Image (cartoon, coloured by chain):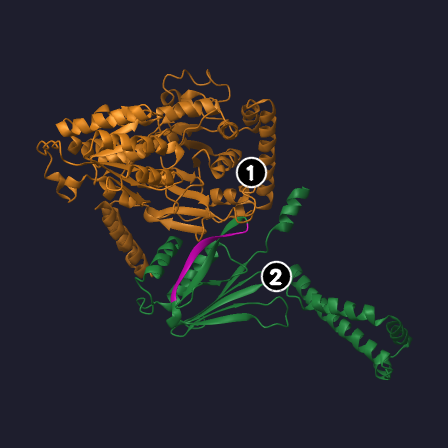
Amino acid sequence: MVLALLARLTAPPTQTLRTLRPTSSTVSFTVSTRPVPTTLAAKLRYYVGLLTRLLLGVCAVFALWVKWRISYGQPTDVLLWLLGGPQTAALLKGTGNVGWQYVGPGAIVVLLLVLRRGHTEESLTLLRDLGVQTSSSASTFLQPPSSRFIPTSDIQDIFIHEAFRGFEVRFYLAIVVKGEEDIVVVFPSLLPRRAMLEEVWRGARKCLWENGGGGRGGEGGGGGGRMKEKAGIGM
Amino acid sequence: MPYNIAMVSDNFYPQPGGVESHMYQLSTKLIDRGHKVIVITHAYAGRTGIRYLTNGLKVYYVPFFIIYRETAFPTVFSFFPVFRNIVIRERIEIVHGHASLSSLCHEAILHARTMGLRTVFTDHSLFGFADAGTILTNKLLKFTLSDVDHVIGVSHTCKENTVLRASLDPSMVSVIPNAVVAENFRPLSQDSHDSKHRTAPGPRQPLGPDDVITIVVISRLYYNKGTDLLVASIPRIIVANPNVRFIIAGNGPKAIDLEQMIERNVLQEKVLMMGPVRHEEVRDVMVKGHIYLHPSLMEAFGTVIVEAASCGLYVVCTRVGGIPEVLPTHMTEFAAPEEDEIVAATGRAIAKLREGKVRTDLFHNQVKQMYSWTDVAQRTERVYDGISGVIRHDEFYQGAGAAGVWSATRGRSGVQSFALIERLKRYYGCGIWAGKLFCLCVIVDYLLYVLLELFAPRSRIDICKDWPKKVPKETKEKELDTARDNSNLMRKRSSRYRREKRDERDES
């Protein structure tokens, strides 16, 4: 019983694949660990959670501001006038009594927790005749996602292969870029399951080289050819 | 009935050697027979991860020792998680370990039994019983072989040795010899591909008394390969037969002794040291000679003398280990592993060649009929059938009596039971202390397995796609037609096309 619970807790978050195909020559695959709320309760929980985060964040910033006003002897009358009542006065006094060494780190911790992104999102966007862009979300909401653009002319191949990672063997989708020693791994931190990768792989090939594979560089080239062989197993 | 087989050993390509080529050839032939074979070995410098070799043989180079690079200590359990993952994703049914000095192979067999898989072990070498090192190795061998389904030895001597070392029931040890790819070891006369046209070659003219006879030695120059005997006997052979030249290929710690011997006796003109040769160049060296000299002190099988005979060389070898079983007497001249005997045997061989009594030109076809990897694969397949219960027990172990009579640990179907308590019974008999220690190991292994099942459940492991199996020509065409309306037509065709091409090349 306990073990089963432990096993459930250690399970990795479920991943979902979203495919966006606005035109026939553009497609975007996004793999995300964000849970999609479907039931009413789940939706409610999701929005309440969001609201709590927002409130907590605002409170932290507010506390910092108040502490700053008080410790520099600036008037806090605005606040009194805004909120009014003796409770506010007591709160203000309380905030003034707590030292900076508690307020500062406390606010920072709360802000970090609020801004931390609970899920990971990685995407692959393909534009025919232009190129592909891979992107991975950062760990906080403030940082922009790290992305990389590879022009179509530089793409030699896209394939699925396997590699050791920790104590297991995982599938990965990789792009071979002309003139680069290392391959570019798509979805590097999530490493979705094989079924998902195959869907992305098929879609990507279809989008990039639908008309006869004209854009495929490195056809018959020694290294590229070998890797295509490997990718062949993914069919 | 096709099986999914995992060959496990520490020795595999890119490192050259006998076990390596045995595993590779056996795997390819088993794939040709419709099985699925993967190889699990440890990572080599610059080679980590997963690779496909010709014919769709998948090789896992497990980066296993990298975690413990500093300590070369064989870690009993750390291999288990990766091994379990591979076994599940490849849907392995039979684990086949090779070479008794490979700790990876022993661990794999232990884990495989814990996971409830059939196991086979192939022993490729002979060991003594006397010194501390071999006693330890033998104890370890006893540990893993206490609970193995079947053991294969490469020769009858090897079988005897393994049975004694691991205290096995002799009926559960089969003998399946190595083989050679005879096409790669053609004599000089069949250099071109017209061998079919000359089915009956005329009698070879005998060598005249003044013609030079070349003796070839190709071996790693180690003590157990008998390099000391070689050092002692070469000067005497040359004194007795002045028109003899030696070609020695290979290197090792004893090379310096050979060089000293050459210097001391001023034999630079008569003895040529070639240094190391690659396996594919061995044939080119062999065909330069008339006699192959193999002074080994210890040999389980001796593939090299089969290769030499296949190249049309008359073989002079020591009567040790499995060597006497390997070739028929008309191809060999035997000697005891002593200096005098080797000199005498070489003398006899030279005399026979000069008289033209030996038809070395016929050796190639004879060897070709005796040894083939297809045959080895067939016999190995029968072992797999036997342990999975496809062949009935009494049929598989002919003359071993009815099932269950001779061994209480076997189930009714004649295959070893997987129950933990049965396994523990088998391990407990290994020795007073060792038995308990081994039982402890098995229990820990089992607990580890339970934990892994909980925290890395099977549902979280992706199943691999198999390498597309070879299909007969007409079905292949049909498949192509159905694939035509597939959007992935282009790549489907190209990969299949390439495969076909490769098959053709392989067949030619």
Q: Main secondary structure of the magenta part?
A: strand
Badge 1: residue crowd in 10 Å (few <14, some 14–19, many ≥20): some
Quadrant in which residue B38 is drawn: top left
Asked if residue A213 is positioned above or below residue B363 in the image, the reply reads below
What residue did someone put label 2 on? A37
How many marks can you see?
2
Asked if residue B296 is positioned above or below residue B283 in the image, the reply reads above
Quarter of the figure that contains the N terminus of chain B? top left
Image x and y of residue A173, in percent: 45, 59
Quadrant in which residue B199 is drawn: top left
Question: Disc 2 marks which amino acid?
Answer: Pro
The residue located at (65%, 60%) in the rendering is A42
Q: Which mark is residue B346?
A: none
Which tint is chain A? green
- Numbered range of the magenta stretch: A156-166
Near-viewer residue (B172 or B272): B272
Q: Is residue B111 magenta?
A: no
Image x and y of residue A197, in percent: 46, 58
Q: Is residue A161 magenta?
A: yes
Q: Can you tell which chain is drawn orange?
A: B
Q: Is residue B21 visible?
A: yes
